[in-house]
Each structure stands twice: as C-alpha cells, then as structure tokens.
Amino acid sequence: MPLLEADSIGKSYGGRRVLASASLRAPAGSVTALVGANGAGKSTLLAVAAGWRGADTGIVRFDGVSYLSARLATLAACGMFYLPDREILSPGITLRRQLDAIRRRYGSSASAEAVAGDLGLSHCLDALPRRLSGGEMRRAELALAVIRRPKCLLADEPYRGISPLDAELITAVFRRLGAGGCAVVASGHEIGVLSEAADRVVWCADGTTVEYASPALAAADWRFQRGYLGRDPRASEPVRE
C-alpha cells in the first residue's frame, strides 16, 4: 500500500472540470514525477493530495488513514510537507532562524548548518529571503522541508526557472529523501531532469492519470510520446514496400 494515495479525484472550478477521475500514489522510499501539460490539473491534484484544496469527488489516504475531506494541518501533523509553487519563506526572518524554528517545533535532530550545506546554502543562512536569487530561494524552501524530516514531500514545480546547478542540488536531495524512506512527489515540465530524479511517473491528461513504474516505461509508451512529448512514434518507423 502506498504511503499517500489520492484516489479517483474530481475537481471543477467555476463549472470547468479540471480533474474527472485522477489518482496519485506515492510509495514510501520512492520519488514520483507528476507530469502533464499546462492546465492538465497537476497542481490541483497535488493540492488535493496535500489537503490544501478540497475535492468534489474522491478520497485521500495517508499513512493508513482515509480522508473524505483531507486538511493540510491534519496531514502535516502526520508527516506531510507541501511545497507549493509560490514563496513560503517569511521575508523578514533569516533562513537560519526559520530552519531553527522548524527544527525545534518538530524535534528534528538535523542542524540548520548541515541542511544548508547539503543544499549549497551555507552562505545564505544569515540572509533575509529577499536577498536570495531565484534558485537559492527554491533551495531554501526545500531546506524547510528537509529539516522537518517528512514522511511525504509534495513539491509543485520545484525546477521551474532555475539553473542546471540548482536542479542538480535539488535532485540530489530528492534522491536522498527517497533513499531514507520518504515518499517524494515532484511535478513539472522538465521531463529530462524529472526522469533523472524519479523512480516512477504519473502522467496527468484529459482529467485523469496514467501511472508508469519507471521513466523508461513512460518514454516507451506511444501514447505518452504523442500526447505529452509531442512525438509521433510512427514517423520513425521504416517504410515497408
């Protein structure tokens, strides 16, 4: 049984159906890439799975408990960390103080210095968030999750607009979290980077989802090639006379 499962999720906004019957499973000890076109419902599915948004239909199961109406505060208390596609750092408090606050709140044995070092942020510990670059900001937000030591991390668009070096550092942290037993889900469009980071792929399209046991299996599926990658596998087939 996966640590996290959002099952048969339906969600509409103002009469527009975004998700009809979408599912997301996140096993412990693995990294799952959630991919799909703009507007396909990736962010909505993550937000529902995290308890940030309510679903019209479906159910969320986390760590053996089922929720018809999941709430982020409840899931967070049980080990969920949701990293949305927006800034979450307090602008007037240094990174060190914010990391220390989370460490004390959850009794983490990790130190701010060690977590910052893993993410290449040692020089940013005593800086205010507004002084950070875009890539440093995203890594600093991930540092909040790492020092929390979550059972499950849901990261929405963590690779958007950052440099290859930033992406490499973030991928390494995702892999370490997964190796340590965390269920990691990262959404995005950066299929090359996500394929390197992930053990599994969930493709969100047409209001539903398709699950693949590996990035290689996703890349080999003609439906995924044509529907998401924009390739027609038949075009490469030899002409037979």
Image (cartoon, helix red, strand yellow):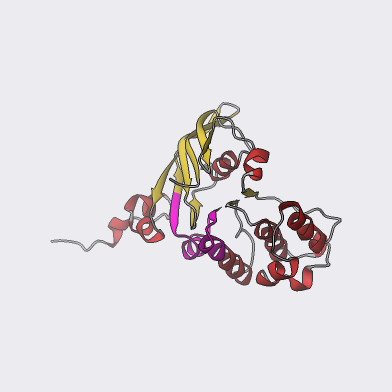
Image position, residue 195 (x, y; %):
46, 62
Residue at figure coordinates x 41%, y 54% from the top left: 230
Q: Residue lying farthest top? A: 15
The answer to whether residue 189 is magenta is yes
Percent across and percent down for residue 67 are 55, 33
Instruction: Look at the image and tell me in which quarter the C terminus lies.
Output: bottom left
- The relative height of residue 17 versus residue 30 in the rendered view (above or below) is above
Which quadrant of the structure image shows residue 128?
A: bottom right
Nearest the camera: 174 or 203? 174
Q: Looking at the picture, how far across and down is residue 63, in whole percent? A: 53, 44
Q: Residue at x 47, y 51 (%)?
A: 27
Q: Quadrant of the N terminus?
A: top left
Residue 188 visible within the image: no
Q: Above or below — where is 179 with respect to 80? A: below
Q: Which residues are magenta?
A: 174-202
Q: Residue furthest left?
A: 241
Q: In the displayed image of the protein, which residue is found farthest to the right?
A: 92
Q: Is residue 44 left or right of residue 1?
A: right
Magenta-drawn stretch contains 211: no
Q: How many marks?
A: 0
Compare residues 133 and 98 and report the one nearer the observer. 98
Residue 171 % position (x, y): 56, 65
Q: Is residue 37 visible?
A: yes
